[in-house]
Amino acid sequence: MGEYTYLKETDESELAIDDEVSETVRDVLSAVRERGDKALTEFTQKFDDVEREQFRVSEQEIAAAADELEESEKQAIDYTIENVWEFHTEQFEHIESFEREFKPGVTLGQRVLPIESAGVYVPGGRHPLVATPAMTIVPAVVAGVDHIVACAPPSKDGTVAPAQLYAMDQAGVDEVYCVGGAQAIAAMAYGSESVPAVDIVTGPGNVFTTEAKRQVFGHVGIDFLAGPTEVLIIADETADPSLVATDLLAQAEHDPNSRPVLIAHSESLAQKTMDSLKAQLPDLKTAETARACWEANGEVIVVEDRETAIEVANDYAMEHLQIMSDEPREYLDGLHNYGSLFLGHDAPVVFGDKVVGTNHCLPTLEVSRYSSGIWVGTYLKTPTHQQLTPEGAANIAPWAAKICEIEGTEAHRLSAEARAPTEREPADSSDGRTEESEG
């Protein structure tokens, strides 16, 4: 790796959850599993200070939520859903089933099937995210999931935030429940008198919902575990320091634990960006959160060349990777660890977060080394199948029997040999490949 220097450095981030949180979540999951709606009622009163007659959000509430929104607000939400729908439909069209004869008499294949039921969590908290329903529900609808439920925490008046509720309805959800936190994850995983159990639970949330997803995994599927948002910006001499600072602050305002990082091609650019960031902070309505985040977690790295910038970015493996350069595609081939990539001065992370169509439920804390977050495939499974003719079985059986003999799996061997020729050795000493299967 080439030379690089830290002008500002912080401790390495990790998804470490306190034992107290884990124990609290364990108690919540156990209570909901054992006592269903009674436990949901207790926890909703305890954590949200809200009492509801029923947890399922009615059609009247959904209609009322739509009436509360201005037409321009509904148009913006509809625009986001349209873009997310278009992109994820394109994803789906590039996932294929197949079947072919790989060897004489041996037909193998794969089917692409939707998961039957999904539960999505739509978080409230500091900023109730309006784009999240599109990101979690639309891919499930496109995938063909038969039944989709959503849970969202109540606001102070005991209802789901109107914009979120409208977005969930427009995205195609079947049922919405006004339940938040770990108890919502438990309800979707185990079911209650009100909330149906599902096969997979997805969506972002705080440390309690994240820990709840970790604890229910295995009983149901989950998308992935994520921490606070991250952005890494690579900026070269063509970048505007003021714009770089603006884009760093856009992610810093999410949470004091968010992680904004700058890789600059010169110390001059790095220093100008830091100066501009400090100058912009006082005018932000979210300055308190953004300042705490930048001071605790912001990092600035100066690199000597493009290759070093790429190497450092791959090592960080962050959620959002933004290339602020006149030639952003010069970086593309070398980059491989990121959740979503934003190419050029005019592709800020906010577009991906909110409206452009790609998904904003992305891996953090180096999870992008092996996962890509929510996509249509999150809600799909690809079971395989095989069909053999007597000829195909006769050719395969001796090989299978030999493997079973090596393993000592006697009943398996007998099952294979029941389809085998008389002799025990493989009938065909070639690798069995046909002209059709070459390549």
Image (spheres, helix red, strand yellow):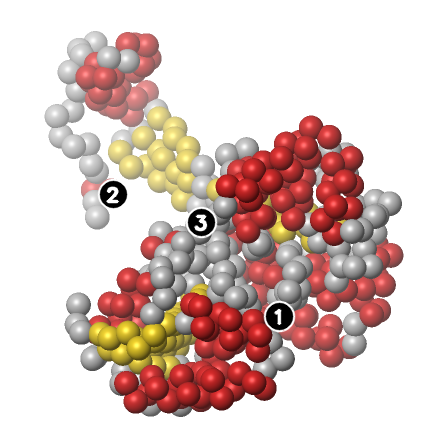
Q: Is 376 located above or below residue 348 in the figure?
A: above
Q: Is residue 199 visible?
A: no
Q: Do the residues labelled 3 and 2 touch (CB within 8 Å)?
A: no
Q: Residues within 10 Å of mark 2 (few under 14, many from 20)?
A: few
Residue type at numbered disc 3: Ala
Say which label, 1 or 3, has the lower sequence index: 3
Q: Is residue 299 visible?
A: yes
State the residue at coordinates (67%, 70%). 77
- Mark 2 or mark 1: which is in front? 1
Instruction: Tell me the residue that label 2 is attached to.
Output: 436
Q: Is 21 located above or below residue 5 in the figure?
A: above
Say which label, 3 or 2, has the lower sequence index: 3
Instruction: Tell me the residue that label 3 is attached to.
Output: 16
Q: Is 19 located above or below residue 82 in the figure?
A: above
Residue type at numbered disc 1: Thr
Horizontal and vertical percent position of residue 296: 44, 68
Q: Residues within 10 Å of mark 1 (few under 14, many from 20)?
A: many
Q: Is residue 249 left or right of residue 48?
A: left
Give the CA distance from mark 3 to mark 2.
51 Å
Query: What is the secondary structure assignment of the residue under circle 1?
Result: helix
Quarter the N terminus occupies: bottom left
State the residue at coordinates (69%, 28%). 34
Give the CA distance from mark 2 to mark 1.
45 Å
Horizontal and vertical percent position of residue 380: 51, 46
- Numbered mark located on residue 135 in the image: none
